[in-house]
Amino acid sequence: MKRIALALAGWLVGGGAWGQKAPLLPEKDVAAMAQEISGETAKRNLEGIARFHRQRGSQGFHAAAELVAERLRAYGLSDATILEFPADGKIFYGTQRSRQAWDTEFAELWEVKNGGAVKLASFEAEPVVLAEDSESADVTAELVEVGEGTKEGDYAGKDVKGKIVLVSAQPGAVQDLAVGKLGAAGIVSYAQNQKTAWSGENQDAIRWGHLETFSANKTFAFMVSLKTAREFKERLGKGEKIKLHAVVKAGQHPGNYEVVTATIPGGDAKLKEAEIVFSCHLDHQRPGANDNASGCATILEVARTLQKLIGEGKLARPARTIRFVFPPEIEGTMALLNGKPEIAKRIKAAIHMDMVGGGPETKAVFHVTRGPMSLPSFVQDVAWGFAEWVNGESYEYAATGKAAYPMVSPEGGKEPLRAEYSAYSMGSDHDVYQDSSFGIPAIYLNDWPDRYIHTNLDGAANIDPTKLKRAGFIGAASGYFLAGMREADLPAVLRMVDLDSSRMVQEIAQKRKQVSEHDGGEIQRAEGTLIRPTVESVTNFVGVPSNRGTVTASQMGQNLERNSEGMSVRTLNDGGESARVYQRTSSPKGPLVVFGYDYFDVEWTKRGHATAPKLLEYEGLWGGGEEYAYEVLNFVDGKRNAQEIADAVSAEYGPVSVELVEEYLKALQEIAVVEEVK
């Protein structure tokens, strides 16, 4: 009984209290959305999407896009359309070099033995067996095991010319060495990407593989399970010869990035040009149920729900327009924002869903992910307010069998949601929106971990309709509120931001403890500089001065800064290299590492450099080189100097020297991504 009382007290203090009303929206709006959103409808659409092998520009992607567009029109979004952006391998969309479409007609792998053959893999049965960007081939060759396959030492004493290599690395990490330099005929891989605590437990899982899109060494690669790979290795280790026959009819060809989009028009003549965007990524291998048919099916259900309720007069038409987009991951979003700059300029916030349906079998934890520290915004607090409320309602239902809003689907589970409010993490389209060249704050709803991600086992059977309903409600409530947010909402939103500042201060204190344990002393930090911009993002969103409102933003900012007192130690500049100030050039737009293309690496290599800036290989306490590099560029604003940028990324990912930051900034200047402000 004591434990139950303590748990209840925790909920009351934490803001997810039992019986409390949902934040920000009137009760009738919450009730209408909670009742209308259907996890079953979302799952039926998910099952339809998961039928297709949805590679960029492929016939399978087009079929999925047509399905989504047809559903949007059926739900009353009459402007639903499929935008096309040419993808020929030459056209650039900002930092994204377009990748040609890739299609497969046929692919099978056989073992030839005892005068016959045994089929090992079939694209028709399980498309994941063929690595993306494989090319046509008809090869019968001996199999040679070379370990990881990424280093020349892996091939010492082994003749692989004209043979098929068995590797543990991703095919793309192997092809230039194995095929290009050493003459291998093809690749069989058992790469174990996306590692979690459950990695390797299922010996039959086949993981998704990729070849390098722009490699000159075109080849094919088949993916096999750990069980198959270990059997191969055991037989080869005993001196047995294994002969494989690979037949592939596939390849790249000029095509289009297709982006499905539709809108619910805003109702305010002055604000309807502004847009709130719901985003997902439609591409993936078949079945790709949680990743990411779940995100696409959920925003499709949000579109149906909001359109129906607005049409019936149960919800007021919001002031701003709500847009839904279904692109290929990252590269499609890059094509949309660069190819349609008029749309990019109208977007005030994005709600991105990438894996939101994992049930208990997937071991998923649902996250509401904050934005990067370079783009402080209140929008994630809005989403967390609704998620925390769903946490409380769903826990009350699970614990007692009663709740005002259990958010349970008839075909779904009854477990509590237990959403986590998490620090910024990279890896999906939210990175594009929040890149400084676009500066669009994004709410990122996602599952992690997921034991079946990027495997043939990521099927619809593992998707929980209750989870889809809850994710749909959080997204719909957040997007609908933001689309209708007015000056009158400032006090409630600012109170929400104020509450979150306490959590921020606690996290900062914990970070300081970890830093102290790591290096034995204080470091120069910049956490306190986040507070006022977060508050100002609220007033900027509704277009009013920061001194307006019952609880003014300026007062709130002062309160928050008092809460963070002592958390920031600013660095004195010596007027040297660290005093340099940079600003981002007007183009190219987008992150420097996109899908299948590393803009920085290509441009840096063009200029004759053989080694990369050290920051790209740096490992901090809470982030690595990719995270540091992304945020260093994002913090470039024409005002911060190199030392201040170093302070900022140190606060986010752990201590890093100003020398590494300055070296990277100079490299960015050399490739004309930034320029120095004199």
Image (tube, grey):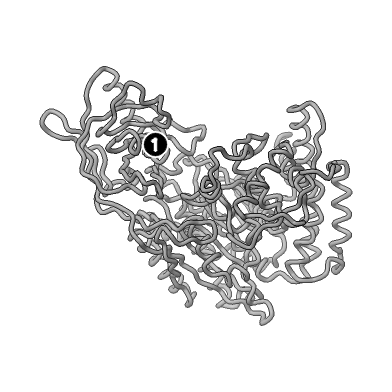
Q: Is residue 508 above or below residue 633?
A: above
Locate residue 164 relative to residue 535 in the image: left or right: left
Locate residue 564 relative to residue 77 in the image: left or right: right
Asked if residue 464 can be seen in this view, the reply is: yes
Q: Is residue 437 above or below residue 513?
A: below
Quarter holding residue 244: top left
Locate residue 119 relative to residue 61 in the image: left or right: left
SS at mark 1 in the image: loop
**Whole-percent x, y for residue 446 in the image:** 56, 50
**Whole-percent x, y for residue 626 in the image:** 59, 43
Q: Residue furthest bottom?
A: 269
Quarter holding residue 533: bottom right
- Quadrant holding the N terminus: top right
Q: In the depicted view, which residue is nearer to us: 606 or 334? A: 606
How many discs mark residues in the rendered view? 1
Q: Is residue 243 above or below residue 507?
A: above
Q: In the depicted view, which residue is nearer to us: 101 or 24? A: 101
**Whole-percent x, y for residue 283 in the image:** 43, 55
**Whole-percent x, y for residue 127 in the image:** 32, 48
Q: Residue furthest left?
A: 115
Asked if residue 503 can be seen in this view, the reply is: no
Q: Residue furthest top?
A: 238
Crowdedness near tag 1: few (<14), some (14–19) or many (≥20) residues, C-alpha within 10 Å: many
Locate residue 454 relative to residue 584 in the image: left or right: left
**Residue at image location 85% in from the left, 46% down from the top:** 564
**Residue at image location 31% in from the left, 46% down from the top:** 126
- Quadrant holding the C terminus: bottom right
- Look at label 1 and name its amino acid: Val
Q: In the depicted view, which residue is nearer to us: 46 or 667? A: 667
The residue where tag 1 is placed is: 174
Quarter holding residue 188: top left
Q: Residue furthest front?
A: 608
